[in-house]
Amino acid sequence: MLPVRWPIVSVMAAMIPRAADGRPLSIYDTKRAKKTLTLAQHHAIKEAIPNYLMVKSNAGTLGTTVDGCQALSTFVNVFVSEHSWAQLGPHGARGCCSALVYWNPREVLQLWGKLRDADWQALRMNAPRLQALSGFLAVNFGVRGFTDTAYDRMGGRASGFLKTSLRSRAPYVSASREDVERLRHWYEEHYPEMLQL
């Protein structure tokens, strides 16, 4: 029985098993939600919904801390940003929660191979480039109100992997061709592997 003070958990426990019909459940834990989940809430969800398979832990949530990742990984797969793999991989992180995989699948899957193989040194060596990319994106585009859809479209176009429109539905900000070129130029100078499909 789930505590009543966790209304979202109660709703999930009542509705998801029927709707999911046995399919795996993934939770997107983000600070953009009104609240992030506690370890006790994750446990309650797993108890009520056994097919709770993974959590996509975004910045500032339980799974992005060493202790939180380690605790969660005992009963659910923890996905975090690629730049955190060197730090959190040894504590149970198993995958990524970002859009980089379709910005450049070759590069990200190569990095994931290092996570799978527990090559922490190689991941530590690459982490500064991923952190620099995050910083570049935040300073140049985050301040302009970019959200997932703008980043996804711009990143995939900049690498050449996606051939998609840059247009996002209102009220979301759209990337421009100039934004794509700015990111492509940054790749050329700082992370050329992102241009090698």
Image: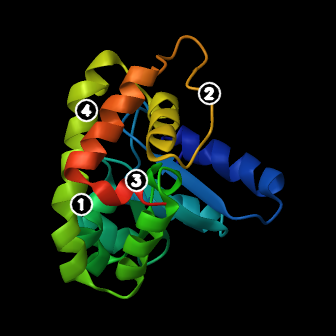
In the picture of the structure, the residue carrying the numbered disc 2 is: 165
In space, the residues marked 3 and 4 are separated at their CA atoms by 20 Å
Q: Earlier in the sequence, mark 3 or mark 4?
A: 4
Identify the residue at the far top of this view: 171
Q: Is residue 57 left or right of residue 102?
A: left
Q: What crowding class fits label 1: few (fewer than 14 Cα within 10 Å), some (14-19), or many (20 or more)?
A: some
Which residue corresponds to mark 3? 195
Residue shown at the point (33%, 36%) measured from the top left: 183
Q: Residues within 10 Å of mark 3 (few under 14, many from 20)?
A: some
Evaluate if marks 4 and 1 touch, with contact meaning CB atoms under 8 Å apart: no
Is 140 positioned to the left or the right of 28 in the image?
Answer: left
First of labels 1, 2 by sequence position: 1
Say which amino acid is labelled 4: Ala
- Name the residue nearer the viewer: 88 or 160: 160
Q: Assign the N terminus to one quadrant of the image.
A: bottom right
Secondary structure under tag 1 reads: loop
| Mark 2 or mark 3, earlier in chain | 2
Give the residue number, with chain letter if any, for mark 4: 138
**CA separation in Å, label 4 and label 2:** 22 Å
